[in-house]
Image (cartoon, grey):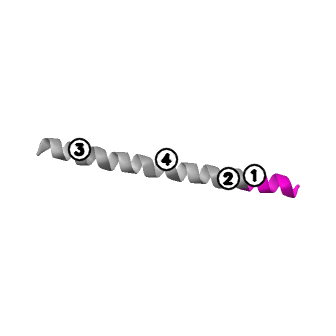
Amino acid sequence: MNGGNEEETNVDYTSEMINTGISLGILTLSLLFVALFRRKRL
């Protein structure tokens, strides 16, 4: 039982890190896109 719980915790932590990475990646891409868009308009 303990082994299964440890594996589940590991999976939860990994998926949480992946979700955080995806969120940061989307945020960075959107900021870069806005910067490029503003630069083109200027």
Label 4, label 3: how far apart the Cα atoms are: 21 Å
Stretch in magenta: 1-9
**Helix, strand or loop for disc 3:** helix
User: Is 20 left, or right, of 41 in this rendering?
Assistant: right
Residue 10 x/y as whole percent: 71, 54
- Return the disc, 2 or 3, that comes first in the chain's sequence: 2
Q: Which of marks 3 and 1 is in front?
A: 3
Residue ID at (78%, 56%):
6
Labelled disc at residue 29: none
- Return the disc, 3 or 1, that comes first in the chain's sequence: 1
User: Is 42 left, or right, of 37 in this rendering?
Assistant: left
Residue ID at (58%, 53%):
17
Labelled disc at residue 12: 2
Residue at the spot of label 3: 36
Label 2, label 1: how far apart the Cα atoms are: 6 Å
Residue ID at (55%, 49%):
19
Residue at the spot of label 1: 8
**Helix, strand or loop for disc 1:** helix
Residue 4 x/y as whole percent: 83, 52
**Residues at marks 2 and 4 touching, judged by CB atoms closer than 8 Å:** no
- Main SS of the magenta part reads helix
Q: What amino acid is labelled 2 in the image?
A: Asp
